[in-house]
Image: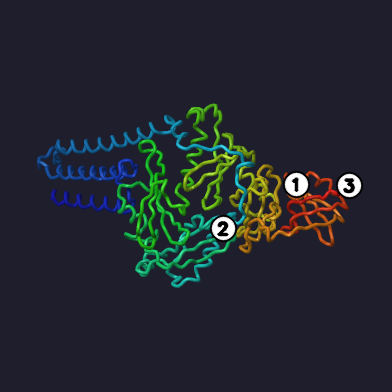
Amino acid sequence: MKKVIRRFLVLLWLVAMLSSYWVFLPPLNPLAVGFWMFVLEGLILVFFAVFILAMADSVEGQTGSTFRGRKEVTPLKVADGQNIRRLGGGILLILILLFGLNLLNSRIFRAKSYANVISVKEADFNKDFPETNISTLALLDRASAEKIGDTYLGTIDKVSQFGISNDYRQITIGQQPYRVSPLEYKNFWKWLSNRKDGISYYVKVNQTTGKAELVRLSEPMKYSDSEFLFRDTLRYLRFKYPFTIFGDPSFEVDDEGNPYYVATIYQPKFMLASKDPVGVILLNAATGETKEYALDDIPEWVDRVFSANNVITRVDDYYTYQDGFWNTVFSQTGVKKTTDSYNYISIGSDIYLYTGITSATADSSNLGFILVNMRTREVTNYKLASATESAAMASAEGEVQEKKYRATAPTLAKLNDKAYYIVSLKDDAGLVKSYAAVDAEDYQQVTVNNDIETLISQFTDLDTSVLSGSGSGSPQTDQDIEIIKGVVEQLGSQMISGSTVYYISSSGKIYKVKATEDSTDQLPFLKVGDRFSGELNKNNYLKNFKIEVEKSE
């Protein structure tokens, strides 16, 4: 009887451990906490198995003698008791060691080590922050991209078999910001019917223009997150790299549109604590080919190596623990932190996370903006006294409070050397109904318009038609420039979003000139009868405006 129980328990232990490994896929690496959780699970199961066997031994060893009508049961054997105590002691020792190592390597004892994981370059927003290229202005948030992408599902063959994954990861293709997401099998039975053919489509949504495309692949994806067996991306990579610590694979496409899954490789920074990226594994979703890269060798088309959580945690550590842990508890001298909102912007072919930096008191003002390259984790702090993102969102909502629109996380833009938050305003159905440009330095200055082209054109001389996909968004070339010359016949002015705009009537047309820091000092003294010249831009704005002074004979 005892042998049968022992064999059954061994078989049950093997099934439980294999099932646990299949589901949780821990790395077989002693530097991973998941590995020790897996070991503890096995030891705890062995502990209960030994205890059950010992109890079976005890019952089997009943003496048959009675004491006052009751049978006596033989106590646990010495060897069984020792095994149980050893197993219990081993489990307790591992738990104590894990807790102790975690405590000793926590921010309480190693605050300055955490603060020095990254370095931050200091810069001035007005001088060093790049002027926003409006052709790459990411206006669509994730929720809006999902709504647009879902409308294209009905255009595919076998529409009943597939859905669209909720990944919608922000990347750049070329230099354009997109959110991309693969199709996925709707359930196990749909997968069973279609797994041989694979997944032939993914959706990409342009975040600037809002235009979406359902991309058909020349070679379908055989590896995805919606697979159920060995071609599940995480399981496939775990069996191929059993000792490597890596995160959940995320979907990206290269500049040619080929689908990949990117798994960031991690190593703990302090013993078992504080994982930090050291490289990536790229999985070709069509062929199953994989390749491991160190951080310095990652292909440039890969946009997201570092997660937002890792980036923000490291930035917070840098600004919080420069003077040690206890300073954050008591005096809080020099303690800063990131704000409660962040977003992404595209600069060139890279994705950058930006967020505000505020004081420990967390009021409604920023001390500057942090810009982090999500591929290299290069961090720059651009100093600029400004409103927090939350304050800007509230200000934008206040401009349309009668409509009860809700603001999305703002996009930071630098237009004509000035910082603005560009905020999308949504109705209760989650549809974008309007846009707001909030002056980052004076968030009470808000301009709202239902048309994004018209809104942006009030703050820049660039061609804003690119925001609807019909223009370049770049400054005019020499061949496109039209020089206007004339005489002021009538003159007027008005304030628009904190800037003075002069209206000049000449030869039956009305031209507009916006007063900026670069405007000629003579602009405020412009009067009827003066001669002028300038370059004609959209909406009859004149750029490089000059007042021609008549020379005396």
Judging by the rendered image, the residue that carries numbered circle 3 is 552
Few, some or many residues within 10 Å of mark 3 (<14, 14–19, 20+): few
Question: Quadrant location of residue 224?
Answer: bottom left
Give the percent coordinates (x, y) of residue 61.
11, 42
Question: Quadrant location of residue 140?
Answer: bottom right
Of circles 2 and 1, the one toward us is 1
Residue type beneath disc 3: Ser
Q: How far apart are marks 2 and 1 (CA)?
A: 33 Å
Q: Distance between the residues labelled 3 and 1?
A: 25 Å
> Are the residues tagged 3 and 2 within 8 Å (C-beta)?
no
Q: Is mark 3 on a helix, strand or loop?
A: loop
Few, some or many residues within 10 Å of mark 1 (<14, 14–19, 20+): some
Q: What element carries label 2?
A: loop
Q: In this view, does 4 lie above or below 161?
A: above
Q: Nearer the viewer, residue 225 or 486?
A: 486
Q: Which mark is first along the chain, 1 or 3? A: 1
Residue type beneath disc 2: Gln
The disc label shown at residue 409, or none: none
Give the percent coordinates (x, y) of residue 511.
79, 57
Coloration mode: rainbow
Judging by the rendered image, the residue that carries numbered circle 2 is 207
Q: Which mark is first along the chain, 1 or 2? A: 2
The disc label shown at residue 519, or none: 1
